[in-house]
Amino acid sequence: MSAAAYRIVQESLTNVARHGVGVTRVEVRVTRAPDGIRVEVRDDGRVAPFEPGRGLLGMRERVEQLGGVFQTATEGGFLVTAELPIERSPA
């Protein structure tokens, strides 16, 4: 699970560097809840016009394969959110 969270942060920061316009701040938050891990990467810039690549699609596919939820938003900058469930060992 931690590898998936790491890759989401890595790809999100790559997208900020490649596609962000006027970015002066990037915030990365990784929080743990009893049932999962939440990853948020938010910048304060604008998204430059670009042809959608495999980055966002790959992140979505990775998260959904793990049974999680992936979302993006463009209000007030660009936001990537991934909620990854934690697998529990049988008791």
Image (cartoon, helix red, strand yellow):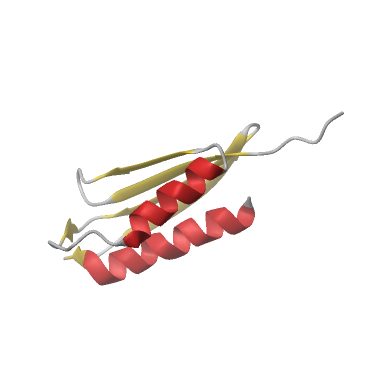
Residue found farthest to the bottom:
18
Count all numbered tags in the image, as a single digit.
Answer: 0
The reply to whether residue 40 is visible in this rendering is no
Which residue lies at the image location 54% right of the left edge and 60% below the top edge?
6
The reply, left or right, for residue 50 in relation to residue 55 is left
The reply, left or right, for residue 52 in relation to residue 63 is left
Residue 9 coordinates in the image, percent (x, y): 46, 59
Residue found farthest to the top:
91
Establish if 90 lies above or below 66: above
Residue found farthest to the left:
49
Residue 15 coordinates in the image, percent (x, y): 31, 64
The reply, left or right, for residue 17 in relation to residue 58 is left
Comparing 21 with 27, the one in front is 21
The reply, left or right, for residue 48 in relation to residue 32 is left
Establish if 24 lies above or below 27: below
Which residue lies at the image location 36% right of the left edge and 68% below the top edge?
14
Establish if 75 lies above or below 28: above
Residue 88 coordinates in the image, percent (x, y): 74, 35
Residue 89 coordinates in the image, percent (x, y): 80, 36
Comparing 37 with 59, the one in front is 59
Which residue lies at the image location 47% right of the left edge and 56% below the top edge?
8
- Quarter residue 91 falls in: top right
The reply to whether residue 52 is visible in this rendering is yes
Which residue lies at the image location 38% right of the left edge and 64% below the top edge?
13
